[in-house]
Amino acid sequence: MRIEFKTEGGFAYFPGLNKPVTIDSDDLPEQEAGELQQMLQEARFFELPKTPGKISPQAADFKQYKVTIKDKKGKHTVQLTDMTDDPHLQKLLNFLKVKASQARTADADKR
């Protein structure tokens, strides 16, 4: 499964530093790939609407995350924010933020 993770907005948003990151579950260690699959099931990711919940006007300075997952069954995109109140979604979002940060660091080290 391939995940495109894109960060947008926030107080100090710099588009050049927030390019989308692709995370391929086949490239993850087996344990992490299993954890990711479990988090997706617990969050019911593929059942979520494109934008779960309302985005508060006070959340204008919060980061937004566009998560697109492509697997054998198809493709599904969900827009999340730092204000996500579902603990399962928050756990998934935290995992993806860490993986995206690691990918950006690895990419920067290659330069």
Image (tube, helix red, strand yellow):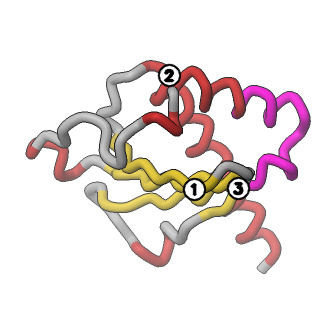
Q: Residues within 10 Å of mark 1 (few under 14, many from 20)?
A: few
Residue at 90% from the left image edge and 34% from the top image edge = 30
Q: Which is more N-terminal, label 1 or label 2?
A: 1
Location of the C terminus by quadrant is bottom right
Total marks shown come to 3
Q: Is residue 14 above or below residue 50?
A: below
Can you give x and y, in whole percent of width and height, for residue 97 in the image?
56, 45
Mark sitting on residue 100: none
Boundaries of the magenta span: 23-36
In the image, residue 86 lies in the stretch drawn in magenta: no
In the image, residue 28 lies in the stretch drawn in magenta: yes
Q: CA distance from mark 2 to mark 1?
A: 20 Å
Q: Amino acid at mark 1?
A: Lys
Instruction: Tell me which corner region of the image, top left, top right, bottom left or bottom right, holds residue 49.
Output: top left
In this figure, which residue is indicated by the disc labeled 3?
2
Can you give x and y, in whole percent of width and height, for residue 87 in the image?
44, 19
> Left of 28 or right of it: where is 47?
left
In this figure, which residue is indicated by the disc labeled 2?
88
| Residue lying at the far right of the rendered structure | 30
Q: CA distance from mark 2 to mark 3?
A: 20 Å
Residue at 51% from the left image edge and 28% from the top image edge = 44
Nearer to us in this view, 77 or 59: 77
Q: Amino acid at mark 3?
A: Arg
